[in-house]
Image (tube, helix red, strand yellow):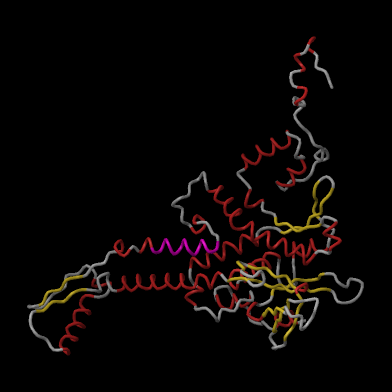
């Protein structure tokens, strides 16, 4: 099997400290971008936030029932996607790799490994993320290869052998897309912004190394040859530059005067430039500023609201894209008609503090639309024997009976 061979050939243990090798294990080729970009803090912080956010949400298979929905624990795909999509990755590792490639390359392709023969033919036994550097998408809109399939995915393995997959044999998760087939990489969009940020950081570093006054005006009354001018320039640079010379008195020979050309950090607006760059990077990912430790507009009372905004503005569209692709590619038409569907559990993001949750549960139970066992399941508590019965406040009456208790004789009538 091509995927097992590729994994078994990796005999050396590589730690995450070696960024390039670690990313290669995730199927990411870092040869096309510089080490500076890989180490760009804000870029990788946003990547980490989104990959962690998706990987920590449990994906479950549900089935619609007459009285609601229930987990389809008896379905083979439930256990496969919840625990281990393939022998080499846990569910968390799988979604981290998929989301990383979707962000870094613009889209991510996952091979669906079906059972080819026997009684279980057609059953899904594994899902394998493909290295996007080795995947090409062919659009056969003229029907040259096949009249029934216009979209092909060509994967080249480590032995340079090409494998051709139909669109029904892979999961294709996209980022921002202009044509609905290929995705646009966040990395490409941010390339210019990241390079500007790095250039600014290098300028600041050099500024500090030169004692914050590397530039100045050396004045001399008289004529001086070019050779002597160069020697004098080198002499003054040796006396003035460097952190060790910062703040020290500079001796100036007779006939010379030296004036520093100070450019303060405030004048250069480095804080504003840095802040603007971070905002542009985080905006491209859909990350909120408080998530990259910019708490200038955050308060204790609105952090939970900002977390909900992150889900609504950013994660909801991503998760919906994943769910729709999984439903269409992994479930049979009969299963879709029977009400099977995949859904990510977003409770960990939307969950409020314990007091707010319990108050909401109390209202839901007393209003008769939440069962006790449903609430206990949300809190990871065992079910109770009487917990599947809807209950409500006994003091409540139908609206049409309001005021009947004040009728003649003080008795209410039931109509």
Q: Position of residue 340 (x, y in %)?
A: 81, 57
Give the vertical position of 242 relative to 401 (above or below): below
Counting labels gives 0
Q: Position of residue 40 (x, y in %)?
A: 48, 70
Residue beneath the point at 52% across and 44% down: 301
Q: Nearer the viewer, residue 356 or 309?
A: 309
The answer to whether residue 33 is left or right of residue 90 is left
Residue beneath the point at 33% across and 62% down: 269
Q: Quadrant of residue 126 in the image? A: bottom right
Asked if the stretch drawn in magenta spans residue 277, the answer is yes
Q: Position of residue 121 (x, y in %)?
A: 88, 73
Identify the magenta region: 273-285
Give the vertical position of 25 relative to 322 (above or below): below
Which quarter of the rendering shows the N terminus?
bottom right
Asked if the stretch drawn in magenta spans residue 244, the answer is no
Which quarter of the rendering shows the C terminus?
top right
The answer to whether residue 350 is left or right of residue 77 is left
Furthest-right residue in this view: 119
């Amino acid at each position: 099997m091509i995927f097992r061979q590729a994994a078994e050939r990796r005999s050396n243990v590589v730690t995450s400290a070696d960024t390039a090798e670690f990313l290669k294990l995730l199927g990411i080729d870092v040869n096309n971008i510089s080490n500076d970009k890989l180490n760009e803090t804000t870029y990788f912080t946003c990547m980490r936030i989104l990959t962690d956010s998706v990987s920590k949400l449990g994906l479950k298979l549900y089935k619609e029932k007459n009285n609601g929905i229930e987990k389809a624990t008896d379905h083979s795909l439930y256990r496969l996607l919840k625990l281990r999509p393939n022998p080499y990755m846990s569910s968390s590792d799988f979604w981290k790799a998929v989301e990383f490639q979707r962000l870094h390359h613009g889209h991510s392709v996952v091979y669906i490994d079906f059972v080819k023969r026997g009684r279980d033919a057609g059953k899904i036994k594994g899902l394998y993320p493909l290295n996007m550097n080795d995947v090409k998408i062919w659009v056969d809109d003229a029907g040259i290869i096949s009249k029934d399939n216009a979209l092909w995915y060509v994967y080249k393995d480590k032995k340079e052998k090409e494998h051709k997959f139909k669109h029904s044999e892979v999961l294709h998760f996209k980022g921002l897309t202009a044509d609905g087939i290929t995705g646009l990489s966040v990395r490409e969009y941010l390339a210019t912004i990241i390079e500007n940020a790095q250039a600014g950081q290098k300028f600041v570093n050099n500024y500090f190394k030169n004692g914050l006054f590397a530039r100045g005006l050396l004045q001399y009354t008289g004529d001086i040859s070019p050779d002597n001018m160069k020697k004098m320039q080198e002499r003054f640079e040796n006396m003035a530059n460097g952190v060790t010379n910062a703040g020290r008195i500079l001796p100036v020979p007779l006939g010379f005067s030296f004036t520093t050309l100070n450019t303060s950090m405030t004048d250069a607006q480095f804080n504003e430039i840095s802040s603007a760059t971070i905002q542009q990077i985080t905006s491209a990912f859909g990350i909120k500023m408080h998530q990259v430790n910019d708490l200038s507009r955050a308060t204790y009372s609105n952090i939970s609201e900002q977390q909900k905004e992150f889900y609504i503005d950013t994660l909801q569209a991503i998760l919906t894209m994943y769910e729709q692709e999984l439903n269409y590619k992994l479930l049979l038409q009969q299963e879709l008609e029977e009400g099977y569907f995949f859904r990510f559990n977003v409770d960990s993001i939307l969950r409020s503090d314990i007091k707010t949750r319990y108050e909401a549960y109390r209202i839901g139970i007393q209003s008769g639309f939440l069962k006790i066992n449903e609430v206990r399941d949300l809190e990871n508590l065992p079910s109770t024997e009487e917990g599947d019965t809807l209950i409500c406040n006994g003091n409540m009456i139908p609206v049409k009976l309001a005021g009947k208790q004040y009728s003649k004789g003080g008795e209410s009538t039931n109509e």
